Amino acid sequence: MSFDLLNIGAAGVRANSELLQTTSKNIANLNTKGYIRERTEHGTMIGGMVGRGETVRLINQFAQQQLNRDISNQSYYEQFVTEASRVDTLFAQDSNSLSKSINSMFNNLQSAINLPSSTTNRSLFMTGAQGLVDQMDRLSGIVVDQNSIVNEQLDIFSEEANNLVQKISELNKQVASKSALNLNNVDHSVLNERDQAIKELAELVDIETLDGENGEKLVFLGTGDALVMQGGAFNLFAMKGNPDPNHKELILDIKDKNVVQLELDSGSLKGKIGGLLAFRDEVLIPAQNQLGQIGLALADAFNQQNRLGMDLDGNIGGDIFKIPTVGGFAYSENTGTAALTATLEPGRGNELPATDFQVTYTSATTVEITAVDAKGNPIGTPTTGNIAGGVITGTGDYFGLQMNVTGSGATGDRFLVKLNQQAATGLELATQRPEALALASPIRTEKSADNNGTATISAGVVTDTDPATSAFAAGTPPTLNDGPYTLTKTANANEYTLTSNSGTTHTFTAPADGKDILSGVGGAAPAPFDNLGFTFDIEGTPNTGDSFEISFNTGGFDDNRNGAALDGLKSSDLVRQNVEPTGSTESHKTFNEAYADIVTGVGVITNQAKTNGAAFEALANQSSAWFESLSGVNLDEEAANLLRFQQSYSASAQVISAARTVFDTLLSAAR
């Protein structure tokens, strides 16, 4: 009996010693990162003795997987909000406002219009124009700097992810080598370290785990792509820019002598890496495209209108802004020798959407032009173009692009055109001369003093000053071909005769309302009346024989009619909003409205991300509390266990003492 008592007491001491060790280990690792609470469980042997204990980790797989998913979502929005808030703050600052620079330039233009012959006021305008270019470059520089920061962080995070993937794979090997016979052989610290690595990987990307053979953990991306596989095999992340080396995309490099590269869906990555990519695709790239679009639309509209005026030197106006030409990025898969350049076709700035463009060879002489978003997804309907003489031509919506190619392209070759992005930093002034501002109109009109009717002639509207397509002749100073012209009312209703300086005549019928009176001139009309490049209105009732003269505005330096047209650009809807044409005036906005859309858009996206981030933070906290309630160390609970096991240990020791006393008594009785 004492023998059984002694064994029971010894087993109790051993069991409670194991319990004390487990509790002490839990208490000691209270602040150890990744530590999972342990519990020792004992069974009852024959004879009522305590069997050998088994120490297990207290972990719930469902709680752990839910925590990892919520951590990925929380990290995604934290990273997104951190980056977007910085850009939102920068764009919202008054010192960085593009609208302020646009208004300043047009205010200076108004001063020049008030005194057209003043070079001082014209110089103020040129200063304002340079300030606008500098401000656009500054804003674009902010975006470019943020993009560089994104690329740097992507490199760092992808390297961290690769290190974690390899670490998980190595730990899997350790687990598999020891658990082939029994999982209890595996040191719990190895399992804790592996779980912690998986949790840290979940902060970078969205992952799912499955149990493999011999205790291994198989890790997959939320997209279904494998990261850690059976037997220690694994895949690694890589950063690749195709075709733009500055626009890095996350890809998965398949190992084990397989060089296949899988392009990942950045929208499903989540985690810090997904947050960075989403910030770049939803905030940075759209903002830079919109900035470039505003700059190009403004520069083109200003250049076109300035060409319709007369500068302070008495010449037809030229370009104020220099619109850049950019090279198309060739995809690495291209097999042909073609190279592509693109710029904005003069006069089509209002047709340019705030997107990138993909040009795909459909044959050696035809291409397909598609607007694409930041992720390369097509928007709207593609346009077909023909290659003739190294120039892409055709009909349809070319988005305002003017593209040239060299070399030979193979079917399937692709190029990415980022005109908007590159234009934001490439816009310059074409001239610094204040005299180049064409404030005057190049024509003047007047009625004859001998007219008997009540008709008057308007100042006229110039629509074309190109010597190749209008009546304006190049020279110093310029003139009207065979001008001036005389317009004489005939005896027939609404009929006029147009006579050149040399006596060439053309009789035509004008609109009954007297508006755009030269609209009927052209076509079969003899030179120089076939392409005049201007028109005007007749108001009132002319008598037969009443005449009007149209001549070049020589010496009209105090004229500000074209300046008024330049000033009207500020309130004109010239910035395209949609890729698909809507046929509505709402499809275009003013320069200031378009910039306000950028600032508002960044702010709205940032606030939405903050709201979503707060929701996922609450979910992550809830999941963490659930996980910690099962797997975390509770100091109060462990302290109570420590006291309980100490008392149990002392009681078991007393059983041994009692057994020894009984045994000694039996020995004494036998003597």
Image (cartoon, rainbow, N blue to C red):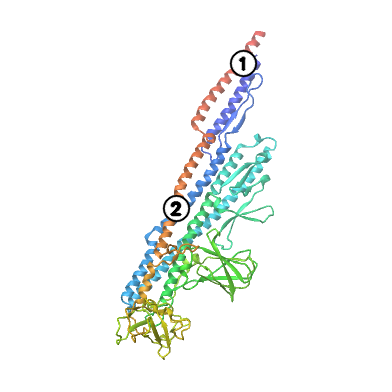
**Which quadrant is the N terminus positioned in?**
top right
Res. 520 in view: yes
x and y, in percent, of residue 301 in the image: 43, 71
- Amino acid type for the residue under numbered disc 1: Ala
**Which quadrant is the C terminus positioned in?**
top right
Horizontally, is 107 left or right of 597 in the view?
A: left
Say whether disc 2 or disc 1 marks the residue closer to the N-terminus.
2
- Residue under numbered circle 2: 606
Horizontally, is 171 left or right of 644 in the view?
A: right
x and y, in percent, of residue 218 in the image: 63, 44
Instruction: Give the CA separation, mark 2 to mark 1.
Output: 75 Å
Q: Is residue 384 positioned above or below 186 on the image?
A: below
The residue tagged with tag 1: helix, strand or loop?
A: helix
Q: Give me the residue at 58% from left, 50% from top.
A: 161
Query: Decide: marks 2, 1 in contact (CB < 8 A)?
Result: no
Count the marks: 2
Q: Is residue 188 positioned above or below 398 on the image?
A: above
Q: Residues within 10 Å of mark 2 (few under 14, many from 20)?
A: many
Q: Residue furthest bottom?
A: 502
Closest to the observer, 109 or 547: 547
Res. 370 in view: no
- Amino acid type for the residue under numbered disc 2: Thr
x and y, in percent, of residue 57 in the image: 59, 34
Front disc: 2 or 1:
2
Q: Give me the residue at 65% from left, 49% from top.
A: 234
Q: Is residue 586 positioned above or below 482 on the image?
A: above
Q: Residues within 10 Å of mark 1 (few under 14, many from 20)?
A: many
- Disc assigned to residue 659: 1
